Image (cartoon, rainbow, N blue to C red):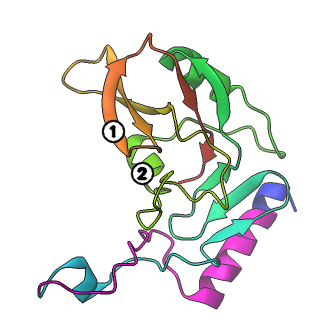
Amino acid sequence: MSKQQQGYNLFLENALKYGFSLFGLPKTDQVVSYAEGDDGFYQKGFPASDDRFLDHGDGTVTDRATGLMWKKVGFQEGKTWAEALAAVEALDFAGYTDWRLPNIVELNSIVDYESSGPYFYHMIFTLDGNTGYWTSSSWAGYPLFAWMMSFGSLLRDMDDKESLYYYMAVRGM
């Protein structure tokens, strides 16, 4: 059985064990309700807990809420958008070659809204909160720009694809 199939089987086994959805979204952990119908009232989503991320011990982690596998350490070198896309597409890491740049929604899924900053699960990921990270999402209104996100300020913005930002690698779905 391939390493990829073993990882998938382990993911499914844990899905049954912990009862989470293959396509869940993380909770914000707001437990106080300030109005009927707000986030604290419903508390929907996959619980943010130590069980959310499965560390494979090889530099990768699977997010049980989304099913995505991430490279735990972000690339801390500035690249243009095209360079970041190419670098991740060429990545051979932990026995996998199907890595890609995350889209804006996927990158937003690892935001830790309960943190006082930097706003990512810093016990899981090694990222620089002071710079932006590219996403694979072009800006539909002006395709010479792409979405990026900074975990230090939760800034989500578009920038010229020739700008230099850090990047991450994700696989799955």
Q: Identify which amino acid the numbered label 2 is placed on.
A: Asn
- Lower position in the chain sequence, tag 1 or tag 2: 2
Instruction: Give left or right: position of 19 versus 12.
Output: left
The location of residue 108, given as percent across then percent down, is: 42, 51
Quadrant (top left, top right, bottom left, bottom right) of the N terminus: bottom right
Can you tell which mark lies on residue 116? Answer: none
Image position, residue 5 (x, y; %): 77, 62
Q: Position of residue 97 (x, y in %)?
A: 74, 37
Q: Which of 68 and 151 is in front in this view?
A: 151
Q: Is residue 15 magenta?
A: yes
Give the residue type that dot 1 points to.
Arg
Asked if the stretch drawn in magenta spans residue 140, the answer is no
Labelled pair 1, 2 in contact (Cβ < 8 Å): yes
- Magenta region, residue range: 6-35
Indicate the quadrant where residue 62 lies: bottom right
Q: In this view, does 112 lie to the left or right of 86?
A: left
Q: Which residue lies furthest to the left in this view?
A: 36
Residue at numbered disc 1: 156
Secondary structure under badge 2?
helix
Residue at 79%, 34% in the rendered image: 92
Which residue is tagged 2?
108
| Residue sitting at the far right | 1
Identify whether 81 is placed above or below 49. above
Q: How many residues crowd mark 2 within 10 Å: few (<14), some (14–19), many (20+)?
A: some
The image shows residue 41 at horizontal and vertical percentages of: 23, 88
Q: Which secondary structure lies at badge 1? A: strand
- How many numbered tags mark residues here? 2
**Quadrant of residue 136 within the rendered picture:** top left
The answer to whether residue 13 is left or right of residue 66 is: right
